[in-house]
Image (tube, helix red, strand yellow):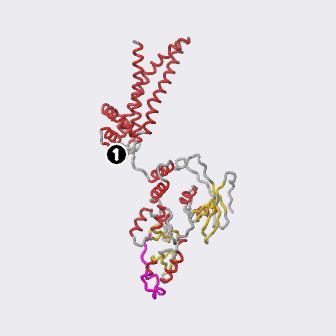
Amino acid sequence: MQALILVASLLGFIALTLGTALFVAAEFSLTALERSTVDNDYRTRGDLRSKQVRNAHRTLSFQLSGAQLGITITTLVTGYIAEPVLAQLFAPAFDAVGLPDGVTSAISLILALVIATSLSMILGELIPKNLAIAKPLPTARATAGPMSLFSAMFRWLINALNGTANWVVRRVGVEPAEELRSARSPQELGSLVRNSARHGALDPGTAALVDRSLQFGERTAEDLMSPRVTVESLDVHDTVRDLIIASSRTGYSRFPILDGGDLDNIVGVVHVKQAFTVAMADRATTELGSLARDVPVVPASLDGDSLMDQIRADGFQVAVVVDEYGGTAGIVTTEDLIEEIVGDVTDEHDDEQADVQSDGDGYICNGLLRIDELYDAIGYRAPEGQFDTLGGLLMFELGRIAAEGDVIDLPERVVASDEDDDRSNTEPEQRWRARVVRMEGRRIDVVALTPIDGSDSEASHG
């Protein structure tokens, strides 16, 4: 009789452990599934199990509460059954050694507790958890039937427990959600894209295109424009012949027309093709002021998506960007917006020199290179500061107008523990030394960047 009870208890232990595994697998498989995967499985198969999985995923809070109830019940009963039985199995061995009854009971109980807990954790929790995370949809389909039956049998208790928990959550100012949030922010999508590319699941070129597209809406007109110091303009009293000469010299097709040579007083824009609407004999005398077309004016803070819509609505494909004081900050064109998404687009009129060029172990960079573009090119993360470009960073660190030959070690950024960084935390930050190669007036035009090895850490400000 004693042996029969022992066998029955062991079988009960195995059955309850399998029950725990069922609830754990159901819980983790449902939380690991994306809604799109569930809906696609239902559309493709349309069977009972796919319907059960879809219903469970749409009532996730209720299903997880049911799984937790099942795990709690099976775990408690497992411990109640297994520990005494295992203790009885070990007791004769300790009695044979000649240990006192009190010591035998204590050691047997402790050993039984350790073994029962270990087996329950490994077989009932860790294995089904790992399986559910690795194969969420097959696991969810396998557990959908038993979970539906259990949820129907204990619906009243699950609702009572879940309702109580939701009441407490609402008291602290949080509204409970029945489903996991399926939408993703641009930052989350960008991180997913970069991770996919790093693990070979997505082509790097495609990943870069998608990542830039996601970040485009976060850019402002100030980020996307050509700054005023690089703008080529003409005066209202310049002639059509001057327009043709300027276009031939610069390769540009559109020019802002200024009144009095003041870039803050743009009266319009002319396109070089308008020159061909003027008779050859009149080109030397026809002033550009008579041809200038009104141009949209946008604030520097306008986001990229809105800027794209506004420029596309205008047939001239150009806009003037003004700062908060009403002064001209720069010019933005359709080409600027396209290049932000697809990368540099060059033609036979563009300057062949790229903003970042390899130079031995280092790089030669345009001083107007944006900080985020610098990170994309060489992986350098600049600290937060009142600057937008590489040249601005150097001026900020120097604390004065730069001069040709100035040398400075670029500052390191302190990355917060909660900051999204796709690189490994163990990967050391590469230090860089910058040298001002050429100035354009008071603006840094060309910068040379060279990596600093670990032994060369003394910063210099030449």
Q: Which residues are magenta?
A: 276-297
Toward the viewer: 289 or 438? 438
Toward the viewer: 51 or 349? 349
- Expressed as whole percent of the image width and height from the top left, the position of residue 285 reads 47, 87
Q: Residues within 10 Å of mark 1 (few under 14, many from 20)?
A: some
At 58% from the left edge and 57% from the top edge, which residue is drawn? 378
- Position of 19 compared to 362: left or right? left
Residue 281 in the magenta stretch? The answer is: yes
Toward the viewer: 295 or 90? 90
Q: Quadrant of residue 386?
A: bottom right
Q: Quadrant of residue 358?
A: bottom right
- Expressed as whole percent of the image width and height from the top left, the position of residue 416 reads 55, 49
User: Tag 1: residue type?
Assistant: Asp
- Expressed as whole percent of the image width and height from the top left, the position of residue 116 reads 47, 24
Residue 391 in the magenta stretch? The answer is: no
Up the image or down, 421 lies above or below 434; here it is above
Tell me if residue 267 can be seen.
Answer: no
At 45% from the left edge and 27% from the top edge, which residue is drawn? 120
